Image (tube, helix red, strand yellow):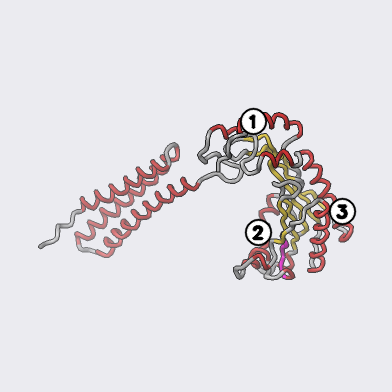
Amino acid sequence: MSSPPFSPLALLGAVVAVTLFTVLLAVSYRPGEGAWAILVAFVLVVVVQIVLLIGSVIVIRRKVRRRWGVLALVLILVVNPVTAMAVGGLSTDRAGNGASAGGSGDEEHDPIWDTYPGSAYVDAKETLDGPSYEDFVGTSDEMLAEIRTALTAEFGFDWVERQPAETEVDQNGYGGDSMLFEYTAPVWQTTTTVRTFEEKSRVVELIRQVLLRYGIANLDMQNAPSSWREPGELTERYGGETLDTQALWDLHTYNAITGAGDFRTSIVDLTLDSAGTVAKDREFDVDYYDMAAEGVELHLDSYALLKEADRADYLEALKPYADLDKPK
């Protein structure tokens, strides 16, 4: 039984059909203005495939340099799967493009939550029972000043305010603004640094003492060797596998002053950065935020803070949500 004759038109029809089908899928996954850019891109793919197909058929039929014709056909077979995978990537991107912390409002929920006055991430009672925005600002200023004073007394540091304080309206996590605020304290940095293991340990000890006076006990060392398991990770991120060989010490405490507060301090000593990874990671902060490459840094921020003047209005705005469960 003889095999059916080779049909260039049938092959051409198959290529065009598959490609147009992927275009249709792309438009359905990305409706609207973005679909036209995708449509143009896929039309170009169709043209390239048609040119390759026609050229390969001509070469093969003339029995001249058939390997080039075969290569063209192989390219066609590769381009179509790549096209299909691109569409799959679009669908994945669309499905995975959900809201990050702060909330873009893409999650499905009852529209009543669009105007929720609180935070999706902090219980309303915790906000009401915790310090107000004004209390947090005052306490954070006092605490950071005490840390600077203690370190200066021991090491003679001079300090520079690298970034000013910032206050922003906090997103409610459901796509709208809340009645709460985010506050970032001024970022302070020393003009010099400490270099010995003993000096760095003393800096950490003095900071812990101040934090404890404010009821904060969970200052965790992110660069501690016990926190990492994969070989080489400590060196890549902090410059060494042990504390005495690390160019960066990085410490965090959560629930600082408020349940949503975060205090961070770092000690940078680039003389230990033999691989240059720490200096490279700091390039953005140095260039964009005008930070010094080395020094001791203090950071403190919080979100879901209620201003004292807004308390009564906040309680009133919460009433429609009293018997509702927050969307997950």
> Looking at the image, which is closer to me, 281 or 235?
235
In the picture, the disc for residue 281 is 2
Label pair 1/3, CB-CB below 8 angstroms: no
User: Which percent across, then down, holds residue 80?
Assistant: 33, 53
Q: Nearer the viewer, mark 3 or mark 2?
A: 3
Q: Nearer the viewer, mark 2 or mark 1?
A: 1
Image height of 244 relative to 61, above or below: below
**Residue 322 lies in quadrant:** top right
The kind of residue tagged 1 is Lys
Name the element at disc 3: helix
User: Which percent across, then down, holds residue 163?
Assistant: 75, 47
User: Which percent across, then down, holds residue 249?
Assistant: 73, 62
Q: Nearer the viewer, mark 1 or mark 3?
A: 1
In the picture, the disc for residue 108 is none
Q: Earlier in the sequence, mark 2 or mark 1?
A: 2
Q: What residue is disc 3 on?
A: 149
Mark-to-mark CA distance, 2 and 1: 47 Å
Mark-to-mark CA distance, 3 and 2: 29 Å
Residue beneath the point at 67% across and 34% down: 179
> Looking at the image, which is closer to me, 111 or 188?
111
Q: Farthest residue toward the right?
A: 153
Image height of 237 relative to 316, above or below: below
Q: Earlier in the sequence, mark 3 or mark 2?
A: 3
Q: What residue is disc 1 on?
A: 319
The kind of residue tagged 2 is Asp
The kind of residue tagged 3 is Thr
User: Where are the magenta residues, as a range?
Assistant: 245-250
